[in-house]
Image (spheres, helix red, strand yellow):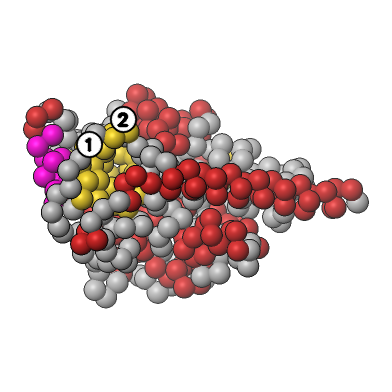
Amino acid sequence: MANSISRPLVAARIAALAVSCTLLTIALQVNGQEGVELETNPSEVVPSTSKLPVAGPAIPNLPTLTLGGKLFWTDEEVQAGWRIQRSSMTGHYRLLDDQNYRHAYGSLEHCEQQLREIQQLRALPAAEGEVVVTLHGLLRSRDVMEGLGEYLQREGDLQPVHVSYASTRRTLDEHAESLSRVIDRLGSRVTKIHFVGHSLGNLVIRRYYGEAGAEDPLWKVDPRAGRVVMLAPPNQGARAAKMWRDNDLFKLVAGPSGKQLGLEWKQIEPRLARPTGEFGIVAGAHPAGSSLLSLLPGDDDLVLSVSETKLPGAADSIVVPLHHGEVISNPEVQAYVLRFLQEGHFVAADQREPIPLDKTTTAPLASEPDCTLSVEGSER
């Protein structure tokens, strides 16, 4: 009886603390180093929904250390750790180096010109061979994927391309469009493009694939696209987001993408496709009732239940005893990720746990946009 009373209370306090910390982070970024970059010419400010690049005169730049764009900036190009980012608040662009120093800002054309000159002057290495594009989750940044990227490069000779996006400020459609531009600019020396997503990042990947089924697609899925590993993906939406959908603080913090995870799931789901290549799913879980913080039915990672991670058509799936954020940095999971990217399974070929497609499953491939999903499959 005590547990039934304390679990909601503890969970509510933890959630309130998380929201408070997030709001503090936003305030610091607006008023601190990130906020300095919001001062730009009115002629360069465009609505965040604009599909056109910002044009305008170059703005004099003083090299400035930034926070790297943790909440308000989205990568449009990534080259050897250098990134051209677009502000989700003003629409203007900036060029950051691999240490988060700003070297240019203003129009896209100006930042591209500066990056090309720097590439030649500093002989920045172009991406080549097999690369792994990583995408973080809601309220996270590219930093959380760097440890995994280092492991994949060290142990598998796979070059990581860490992509940041303004996860709380824009929609999944806009995130995927920016991802398409990053992929388009990887260069001709790249032979294969794998993906690893965490949480919301997986839906950005699926939305990228989903554009292939549109009547008038804004981008094409790169033919070099390879395998995909989904870490704690909300493939069936997020019950937690639905529970908090009427909470004003949640709506403020989670933004448009958080709304799509919950209240608007039925609208976004048909535009989320299954990857055309092999994909595998890693779900975190603790037994139902084992944590006072969990309000979800069944085994869960405190954010998603195992059933919410499933997607029919997965070549392999595995459940690990970890919380939602732990799956990124766990050494065993990192080994699973590498093995799947190289061999198409997490443990061994004869130990695969696929999530099959059956007669009731209409999960869309990239060329089948208007479909629904059934939740079927098995777990280890």
Any magenta on residue 32?
Answer: no
In the image, which disc is placed on residue 93? Answer: none
Depth check, front residue: 311 or 133: 133
Relative to 215, residue 346 above or below: above
Secondary structure character of the magenta stretch overall: helix
User: Magenta residues?
Assistant: 109-118
Sooner in the amino-acid sequence: mark 1 or mark 2: 1
Amino acid type shown at disc 1? Leu
Which residue is nearer to you in this view: 31 or 300?
Answer: 31
x 53%, y 31%: residue: 330
Q: How many marks?
A: 2
Seen from this angle, which residue lies furthest top? 154
* Residue identified by numbered label 2: 99
In what element is the residue under mark 2? loop
* Neighbour tally class for label 2: few under 14, some 14-19, many 20 plus, Cα within 10 Å: few
Type of amino acid under label 2: Gln
Q: Is residue 239 left or right of residue 113?
A: right
In this rendering, the label closer to the viewer, 1 or 2? 1
Element class at badge 1: loop
In percent of width and height, residue 72 lies at 39, 51
- Residue 209 in sight here: no
**Which residue is at a point 56% across and 36% down the rendered structure image?**
326
Q: Which of 380 and 322 is in front in this view?
A: 322
> For residue 116: magenta?
yes
Circles 1 and 2: CB atoms closer than 8 Å: no
- Residue at numbered disc 1: 62
Q: Which of the 4 image quarters holds residue 318? A: top right
Instruction: Where is residue 2? Give x, y as percent.
Output: 89, 48
